[in-house]
Amino acid sequence: MKITILTIFPEMFNDFLNTSIIKKARLKNLVDIKIVDFRSFSNLPTKRVDDYPYGGGPGMVLMCQPVLDALKSVKTDNSYVVITSPIGVRFDQQMAYRLLEKEELIIICGHYEGFDARIYEYADQHISIGDYILTGGELPAMVITDAITRLVKDTISEEATVEESFEDGLLEYPQYTRPETYEGLQVPKVLLSGHHDNIRVYRLKESLRTTYLNRRDLLEEREFTEEEKKLLEEVIEEEKKQ
């Protein structure tokens, strides 16, 4: 998969591209991530990329020329163009899978007070990573890129992704490692039992508990199995007694 990120702060991506899973995926040629500085496409002597908004108002707006010239330099017939923007659809795991299906993804990072609205005509989708304000679109671009890259085949083991939060619509169950006891806190005995089905049921129940306590909205439209219904009822009763 190819991901191209258009930004005026390419230096922000140096560590991101050369750390952990992203680095491994790039070295294995599983994903090709390219950073393009659209400031270099400005036709102004000062390489300026923003200007005052028509109609007045605070802040500066990114101009069409440098952004669109940079876009045209990398866009192909197979490109899917995304703008990071607070007006966009909320990014989630399902969207990560949909974007994974694209052969070439281009992410345009916003900055200042946003884009000249005519740039929107060249985008296929607007994406927001949450209802809060950031200085620019670089962090959202990293979030989107990371979420997609780890889904690319052979980047990490399939087993590792299947049991993570949001993969099956639930938050992940609690995990433990050595030592068995730490400052009086004990690893649940069921995890030490070696009984695989009991461990599976325990993990499913705790996944339901974690979701019920932290993201109850994820349960509202879920189609529960009979086993899940029973376990969730137990969780609710147990939590009422707390």
Image: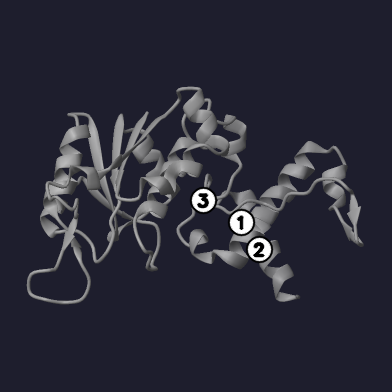
Q: Which three-letter amino acid code belongs to the residue tagged 3?
A: Gly
The residues tagged by marks 3 and 1 sit, at their Cα atoms, a distance apart of 15 Å
- Name the residue that disc number 2 marks: 233
Q: Which three-letter amino acid code belongs to the residue tagged 2?
A: Glu
* Residue at the spot 71% in from the left edge and 48% down from the top edge: 203
The residues tagged by marks 3 and 2 sit, at their Cα atoms, a distance apart of 18 Å
User: Can see residue 94?
Assistant: no
Expressed as whole percent of the image width and height from the top left, the position of residue 137 reads: 34, 55
**Element under label 1?**
helix
User: Taking 135 as reference, is 235 left or right?
Assistant: right
**Of marks 3 and 2, the one in the foreground:** 3
Q: Badges 1 and 2: C-beta atoms under 8 Å apart?
A: yes
**Of marks 3 and 1, the one in the foreground:** 3
Q: Residues within 10 Å of mark 2 (few under 14, many from 20)?
A: few
Q: Residues within 10 Å of mark 1 (few under 14, many from 20)?
A: some
Residue lying at the far top of the rendered structure: 28
- Name the residue that disc number 1 marks: 229
Tell me if residue 59 comes above or below residue 199 in the rendering: below
Expressed as whole percent of the image width and height from the top left, the position of residue 101 reads: 34, 33
User: Taking 67 as reference, is 242 left or right?
Assistant: right
Expressed as whole percent of the image width and height from the top left, the position of residue 178 reads: 85, 45
* Residue at the spot 89% in from the left edge and 49% down from the top edge: 180
User: Taking 40 as reference, is 174 left or right?
Assistant: right
- Name the residue that disc number 3 marks: 169
Q: Nearer the viewer, residue 107 or 58?
A: 58
